[in-house]
């Protein structure tokens, strides 16, 4: 019930750090006669085929903390109430017009100007229990808001004082294009149906991507109502698809027999792609040139994390840890860094997907396969967007390279001047400057890593410092020839691509590995003749057309090479998912046929060849 509610609040009454009563409210449609009747018969559950509720499991949770709950609902001034009470071992109900005192408790919360028609669940504690930790409670509520279509705001009060405020705001929404076959005789278009034909993805407006912003405000001191609220914000990308169902009659009958309701004629599948800190005051999100980054600041980033940011940080899944949502989050992982919400048929306790019953197994496996198809389409769409941004910002990267080359030229001239002077002091000064340059280049390489740390990612960017000569144990020239220095800071497009690709670095799903297998089946079936896209130094290309850095071959202008730092941060994606091959000598030969090496590059080639 009340899927149309846009706002909910939780008012906790406490005494000496223990909870004595909780009032849960939402501003959805007031209860209708049929809703009151269904509430009276809890075990019958929700017969609506478009809802995931079954067997009254949700309603029964009231009795886990409360002996005799009270429900109040109705238009302002016309509220009705239903009280539950026990006679011996029997549970009884009593209905009628809500008394004025009860109406005030359930509706006002010290806000007389509130015009909402609230539905309230008043739950006096059976046994007083500890006041929940608001950070952990906020993480739970944020997870609950992940896939809500209408509910966008949750407020938590403790003794009438606002302590926690969570808001979800839609920023933009657009259609995901379905790749079509390049010609009528080629089978290279996207497959959008499950292998059983039971589910078919919609097209056009039925297939969308939405960007949302989640804002969390949390009072710093719960015991002090006058303390300030601290705020943290993240943004996230969702993909959503309307799915048509074509369930065989014999399977449909068996599903009805088990679930006691008809399977849906159409349903919605949603995936959550990622979340990132987008605080405009966070300078680490701005790409700067020639910035000497303070490594001590990097080490201290984690210690300055606010309580509100601990809540928003939990919003994004790490690789392999995405969860299945069947209404609420379950303990089942997807095996990807992607959350999935779909009306899968769960077991009675709603913590696992039912793969035991043959009919439900067929339904669930086919639906997971379609979800895998949606994941692939969302990946294609996002990488295409990143590719367009990469082309638009080509001039910015070019200017950085020009600036870098100019710095190198000036440094070389200064070094030559110091060498000619022959003075010990000059030599010492030159040595000190060289050390600073090494630190500068390391800091530049680490810039993207620091940005991710500041943005709160749990799975951070691998340090590009691995390419530094001291780590490799080679002399400087050999190291530079076989591992060309690349100290350009990560661009925003590269950071987005890394986050996206890391989300698709698969792990076995737990506790049931079948979930990941069915998702992977749909992912691979969607575009079977095309490898997933990757971001190279020349833009976004298919994995089979990209090349991974190898023994310095990348220095000679070979096209479509993946930057080493990008590859380091999503190795499994490049190697296992996209199938990117390493550079080889044939790639170099083909590239050299199409270009004329300048003097500096020719000298580098002659030095490099014996070492290769």
Image (cartoon, rainbow, N blue to C red):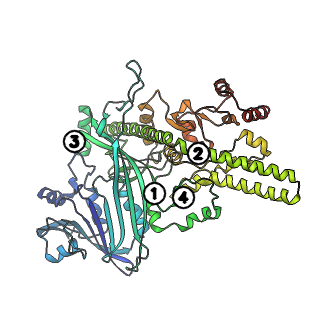
| Left-right relation of 115 to 464 | left
Image depth: mark 3 or mark 2 in front? 2
Q: Which mark is residue 70?
A: none
Q: Tell which circle, 1 or 4, labels the residue nearer the N-terminal end.
A: 1
Percent position of residue 587, x then y? 64, 27
Q: Tell which circle, 3 or 1, labels the residue nearer the N-terminal end.
A: 3
> Which residue was labeled with disc 4?
284
| Left-right relation of 492 to 418 | left
Percent position of residue 76, x then y? 14, 68
> Which residue was labeled with disc 2?
399
Mark 3 nearby-residue class (10 Å; few <14, some 14–19, many ≥20): some
Image depth: mark 3 or mark 1 in front? 1
Percent position of residue 187, x then y? 41, 22
In the rendered view, tell whether residue 75 sits above or below residue 47. Answer: below
| Circles 1 and 4: CB atoms closer than 8 Å | no
Question: Toward which corner of the image does residue 399 lie, by quadrant?
Answer: top right
Residue at screen point 71% across, 32% down: 598
Image depth: mark 2 or mark 4 in front? 2
Q: Tell which circle, 2 or 1, labels the residue nearer the N-terminal end.
A: 1
Residue at the top extreme, as displayed? 185
> Which residue was labeled with disc 1?
278
Image depth: mark 4 or mark 3 in front? 4
Q: Which mark is residue 262?
A: 3
Compute the Cα span from label 2 to label 4.
Answer: 20 Å
Q: Quadrant of the N terminus?
A: bottom left
| Circles 2 and 4: CB atoms closer than 8 Å | no
């Amino acid at each position: 019930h009340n899927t149309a509610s846009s706002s909910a609040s939780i008012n906790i009454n406490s005494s000496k750090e223990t909870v004595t009563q909780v009032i849960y409210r939402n501003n959805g449609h007031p209860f209708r006669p049929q809703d009151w009747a269904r509430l009276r018969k809890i075990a019958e559950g929700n017969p609506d085929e478009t809802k995931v509720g079954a067997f009254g499991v949700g309603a029964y949770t009231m009795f886990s903390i409360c002996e005799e709950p009270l429900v109040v609902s109705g238009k302002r001034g016309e509220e009705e109430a239903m009280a539950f009470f026990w006679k011996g071992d029997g549970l009884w109900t009593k209905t009628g017009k809500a008394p004025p005192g009860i109406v005030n408790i359930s509706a006002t919360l010290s806000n007389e100007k509130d015009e909402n028609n609230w539905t309230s669940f008043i739950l006096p504690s059976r046994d007083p229990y500890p006041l929940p930790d608001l950070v952990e409670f906020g993480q739970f509520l944020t997870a609950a808001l992940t896939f809500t279509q209408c509910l966008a705001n949750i407020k938590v009060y403790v003794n009438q004082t606002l302590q926690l405020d969570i808001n979800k705001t839609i920023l933009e929404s657009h259609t995901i294009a379905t790749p079509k076959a390049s010609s009528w005789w080629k089978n290279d278009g996207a497959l959008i149906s499950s292998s059983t034909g039971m589910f078919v993805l919609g097209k056009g407006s039925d297939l969308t991507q939405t960007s949302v912003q989640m804002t969390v405000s949390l009072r710093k001191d719960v015991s002090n109502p006058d303390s300030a609220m601290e705020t943290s914000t993240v943004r996230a990308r969702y993909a959503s698809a309307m799915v048509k169902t074509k369930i065989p009659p014999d399977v449909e009958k068996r599903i009805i027999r088990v679930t006691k309701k008809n399977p849906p004629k159409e349903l919605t599948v949603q995936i959550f792609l990622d979340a990132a800190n987008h605080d405009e005051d966070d300078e680490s999100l701005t790409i700067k040139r020639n910035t000497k980054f303070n490594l001590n600041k990097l080490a201290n980033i984690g210690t300055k994390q606010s309580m509100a940011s601990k809540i928003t940080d939990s919003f994004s899944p790490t690789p392999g840890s995405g969860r299945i949502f069947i209404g609420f989050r379950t303990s089942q992982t997807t095996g990807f860094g992607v959350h999935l919400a779909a009306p899968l048929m769960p077991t009675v306790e709603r913590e696992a997907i039912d793969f035991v019953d043959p009919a439900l197994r067929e339904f669930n496996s086919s639906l997971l396969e379609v979800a895998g198809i949606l994941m692939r389409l969302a990946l294609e769409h996002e990488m295409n967007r990143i590719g367009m941004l990469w082309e638009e910002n080509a001039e910015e990267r070019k200017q950085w390279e020009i600036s870098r080359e100019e710095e190198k030229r000036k440094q070389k001239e200064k070094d030559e001047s110091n060498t000619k002077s022959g003075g010990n002091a000059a030599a010492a000064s030159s040595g000190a400057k060289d050390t600073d340059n090494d630190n500068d280049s390391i800091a530049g390489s680490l810039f993207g890593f620091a940005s991710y740390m500041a943005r709160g990612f749990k799975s951070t960017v691998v340090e590009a410092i691995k390419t530094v000569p001291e780590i490799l144990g080679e002399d400087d020239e050999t190291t530079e020839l076989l591992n060309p220095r690349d100290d350009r800071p990560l661009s925003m497009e590269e950071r987005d691509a890394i986050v996206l690709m890391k989300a698709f670095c698969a792990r076995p799903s737990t506790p049931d590995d079948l979930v990941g297998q069915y998702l992977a089946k749909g992912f691979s079936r969607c575009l079977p003749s095309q490898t997933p896209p990757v971001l190279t130094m020349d833009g976004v290309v298919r994995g089979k057309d990209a090349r991974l850095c190898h023994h310095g071959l990348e220095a000679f202008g070979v096209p479509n090479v993946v930057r080493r730092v990008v590859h380091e941060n999503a190795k499994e994606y490049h190697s296992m998912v996209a199938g990117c091959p390493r550079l080889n000598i044939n790639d170099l030969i083909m590239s050299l046929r199409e270009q004329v090496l300048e003097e500096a590059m020719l000298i580098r080639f002659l030095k490099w060849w014996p070492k290769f």
